[in-house]
Image (cartoon, rainbow, N blue to C red):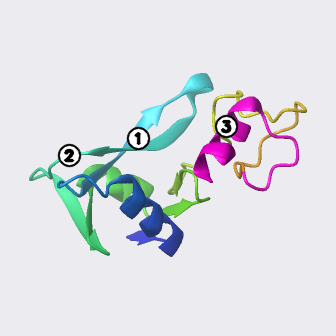
């Protein structure tokens, strides 16, 4: 099962408006401290993939991976994607401050609502306007 929120669909449309290919692969990547998270890339489906059509986009994921991590939810804070599944939490923060905000507190993952923005979060907000 795959759920894509309206905010995520809107950001997908903005991010990929100049791309003809609208097949988005979901994959799991291993980050610092062994933390698993989802990544996305543009790619054609393979015979071993599950394919979901949602609002003009084709989301693809390996069938075996899907069995292990479903249900998957793709959401957005308006600046980036927050993808979560069974046993894999959405990444928090912009990632450029080590997931710590400007005051050293744990990042909520929502740059727009942060009260102590890191330098990268400030740039993201300024460029979004």
Badge 2 or badge 1: first in the primary sequence: 1
- Helix, strand or loop at label 1? It is strand
Image quadrant assignment for residue 40: top left
Q: Which residue is mark 2?
A: 43
Q: Which residue is mark 3?
A: 123
Image quadrant assignment for residue 39: top left
Nearer to us of marks 2 and 1 is 2
Crowd rating for badge 1 (residues with CA inside 10 Å; few <14, some 14–19, many 20+): some
* Residue pictured at 17% horizontal, 55% vertical: 20
Q: Which residue is mark 1?
A: 28
Magenta residue check for 118: yes
Q: Position of residue 35 (x, y in %)?
A: 57, 33
- Helix, strand or loop at label 3? It is helix
Q: Name the image quarter holding the C terminus.
A: bottom right
Q: Are marks 3 and 1 in contact (CB under 8 Å)?
A: no
Q: Position of residue 125 (x, y in %)?
A: 67, 47
| Left or right of 115 in this view: 120 | left
Crowd rating for badge 2 (residues with CA inside 10 Å; few <14, some 14–19, many 20+): some
Viewer can see residue 84: yes
Q: Which residues are magenta?
A: 112-129
């Amino acid at each position: 099962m795959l759920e894509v929120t309206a905010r995520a669909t809107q950001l997908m449309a903005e991010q990929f408006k100049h791309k003809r290919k609208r097949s988005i692969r979901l994959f799991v990547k291993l980050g610092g401290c062994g933390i698993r998270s989802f990544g996305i890339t543009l790619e054609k489906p393979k015979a071993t993939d599950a394919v979901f059509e949602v609002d003009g986009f084709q989301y693809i994921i390996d069938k075996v991976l899907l069995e292990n991590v479903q249900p998957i939810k793709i959401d957005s804070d308006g600046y980036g994607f927050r993808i979560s599944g069974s046993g894999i939490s959405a990444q928090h923060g912009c990632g450029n401050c080590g997931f710590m905000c400007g005051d050293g507190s744990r990042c909520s993952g929502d740059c727009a609502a942060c009260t102590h923005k890191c330098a990268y979060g400030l740039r993201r907000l300024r460029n979004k306007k």
